[in-house]
């Protein structure tokens, strides 16, 4: 094996020095190791020992540095997504097609060009895959933590942590998993010219994944740019909102099994425009959370985890990078927006199919999703669109009861302390607790020198047997209930 050699490099920003030792070559490597910083030679040797331990032999590997130049920590922390979009070289030139890639630390972001996936999202080794497919390099990616998390190069000490165990687990997956290149049918993106004819032609479809692109988040004031949908996860359709008759859309959605990614948001827009038949029967965000609650469950993340089209949004991200003041998606030209928006619907459908199979592996979880999660979500769609009945007489009655309880507690406080003071003033409470009642000093002070009297301090005094603190906690509890649920405060 030869040592590092300098990689091909693009033009570097002025004042930047290229990392001189970027790639360690190996003939017919067993795996590729992608790093975001030059490893200490002891880290390299320890990694080789780990690999030999798992494989049972010396391992041929290729080591690649993932940036065009060595960045400062400030460049990585200021906006790492912007940095990787601009400063990751063409990794397909260095990663052989069909490779298994071990990414150390933040090198994962060089693959995804975003922070939507993080290493800890893959820690569930029991019921979720710990790898994903990268369509750009056509390789399989296995994220792990950086070596410094469990190996100290200064003295060679290894810390017996989960992160070390996870590295060994991932190396084992690389050594044993047979992962051939997947078949990836071409996605068909169709711009619909005659929306009425489209609705009639596809009226008999039973399943639909759909999405909206809007100018903002407020369904009352923001505009809809387009409606996109897919019926099979292969072909997607782009319908300009200005071409849509909402009555026809309402009829079109009637009776269909509707799929989306956080579709409750989109339903609010359509319900306010008279499309009563929009609803949600399968939501990938909710399903993703049930399947793995420690990861991000955005559609961007799911595209990597459940499909072979991860990074489908990169062209849009590059466009946004060139237009940093862009906030309104409706202003994006259709040649950029259409591919992104249509793929949203196509990929949502693909994620739905993959998640459905995963949920079916656990009948109880599947039942919970179908019988509790989704009905509750549909109920909130209805509530947000139509409101809900409130018995105002009952609200007033409850407010009166809470107010009487609060006033009774206030009298108890005054009787117990022999003082009268403003229970609503933190400043006055802090002075009274310090100077008049002489409660123990907890080391927490206001700017004016009085004691802090937040819930933490009151709980501590209550534990020490000071009844005034316990009474004040009860008083504030009634206050919170009145303000939160009756809408009035006296």
Image: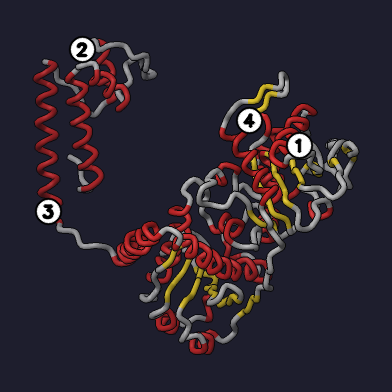
In the picture, measured across the screen, residue 153 lies left or right of residue 190, that is: right
Q: Secondary structure at mark 2?
A: loop
Tell me which colouring the rendered structure shows: secondary structure
Residue 98 lies, in percent from the top left, at 76, 57
Task: Say whether marks 4 and 1 touch (CB < 8 Å).
Answer: no
x 70%, y 33%: residue: 73
Q: CA distance from mark 2 to mark 1?
A: 57 Å
Q: CA distance from mark 4 to mark 3?
A: 57 Å
- Extreme residue toward the front, this view: 56
Task: Say whether marks 2 and 3 touch (CB < 8 Å).
Answer: no
- At label 1, counting other C-alpha atoms closer than 10 Å, the crowd grade (few under 14, some 14-19, many 20 or more) is some
Mark closer to the chain start, 4 or 2: 4
Q: Is residue 36 visible?
A: no
As displayed, is residue 88 above or below residue 226? above
Q: CA distance from mark 2 to mark 3?
A: 40 Å
| Quadrant that contains the C terminus | top left
- Residue holding disc 3: 394
Mark closer to the chain start, 3 or 1: 1
Residue 437 got which mark? 2
x 62%, y 42%: residue: 169
x 57%, y 54%: residue: 301
Residue 380 got which mark? none
Residue 149 got which mark? 4
Q: CA distance from mark 4 to mark 1?
A: 20 Å
- The mark lying in front, picked from 4 and 2, is 4
């Amino acid at each position: 094996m030869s040592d590092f050699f300098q990689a091909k490099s693009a033009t570097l920003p002025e004042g930047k020095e290229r990392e001189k030792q970027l790639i360690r070559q190996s003939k017919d490597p067993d795996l590729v190791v992608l790093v975001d910083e030059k490893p200490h030679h002891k880290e390299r040797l320890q990694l080789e020992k780990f690999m030999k331990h798992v494989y049972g032999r010396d391992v041929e590997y290729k080591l690649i540095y993932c940036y065009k130049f060595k960045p400062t920590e400030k460049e990585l922390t200021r906006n790492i997504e912007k940095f990787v979009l601009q400063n990751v070289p063409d990794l397909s030139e260095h990663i052989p097609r069909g490779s298994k890639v071990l990414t150390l630390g933040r090198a994962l972001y060089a693959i995804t060009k975003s922070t939507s996936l993080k290493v800890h999202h893959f820690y569930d080794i029991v019921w979720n895959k710990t790898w994903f497919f990268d369509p750009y390099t056509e390789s399989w990616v296995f994220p792990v933590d950086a070596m410094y998390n469990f190996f100290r190069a200064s003295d060679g000490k290894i810390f017996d942590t989960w992160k070390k165990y996870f590295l060994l687990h991932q190396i084992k997956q690389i050594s044993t998993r047979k992962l051939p290149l997947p078949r990836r049918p071409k996605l068909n993106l169709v711009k619909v010219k005659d929306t009425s004819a489209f609705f009639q032609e596809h009226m008999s479809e039973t399943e639909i994944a759909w999405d909206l692109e809007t100018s903002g988040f407020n369904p009352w004031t923001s505009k809809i740019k387009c409606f996109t949908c897919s019926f099979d996860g292969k072909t997607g359709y782009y319908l300009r909102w200005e071409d849509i008759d909402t009555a026809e859309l309402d009829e079109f959605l009637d009776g269909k099994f509707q799929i989306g990614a956080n579709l409750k948001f989109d339903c609010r827009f359509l319900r306010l425009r008279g499309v009563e038949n929009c609803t949600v029967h399968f939501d990938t965000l909710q399903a993703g959370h049930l399947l793995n609650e420690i990861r991000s469950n955005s559609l961007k993340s799911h595209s990597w985890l459940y499909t072979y089209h991860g990074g489908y949004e990169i062209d849009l991200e590059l466009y946004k990078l060139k237009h940093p003041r862009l906030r309104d998606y409706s202003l994006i030209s259709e040649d950029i927006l259409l591919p992104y928006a249509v793929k949203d619907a196509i990929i949502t459908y693909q994620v739905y199919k993959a998640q459905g199979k995963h949920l079916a592996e656990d009948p109880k979880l599947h039942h919970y999703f179908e019988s509790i999660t989704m009905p509750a979500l549909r109920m909130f769609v209805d509530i947000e669109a139509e409101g809900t009945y409130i018995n105002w007489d009952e609200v007033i009655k409850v407010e009166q009861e809470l107010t009487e309880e609060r006033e009774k507690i206030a009298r108890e406080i005054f009787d117990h302390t022999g003082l009268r003071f403003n229970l609503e003033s933190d400043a006055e409470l802090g002075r009274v607790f310090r100077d008049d009642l002489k409660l123990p000093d907890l080391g927490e002070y206001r700017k004016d020198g009085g004691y802090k009297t937040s819930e933490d301090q009151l709980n501590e005094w209550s534990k020490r047997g000071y009844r005034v603190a316990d009474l004040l906690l009860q008083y504030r509890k009634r206050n919170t209930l009145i303000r939160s649920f009756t809408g009035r405060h006296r």
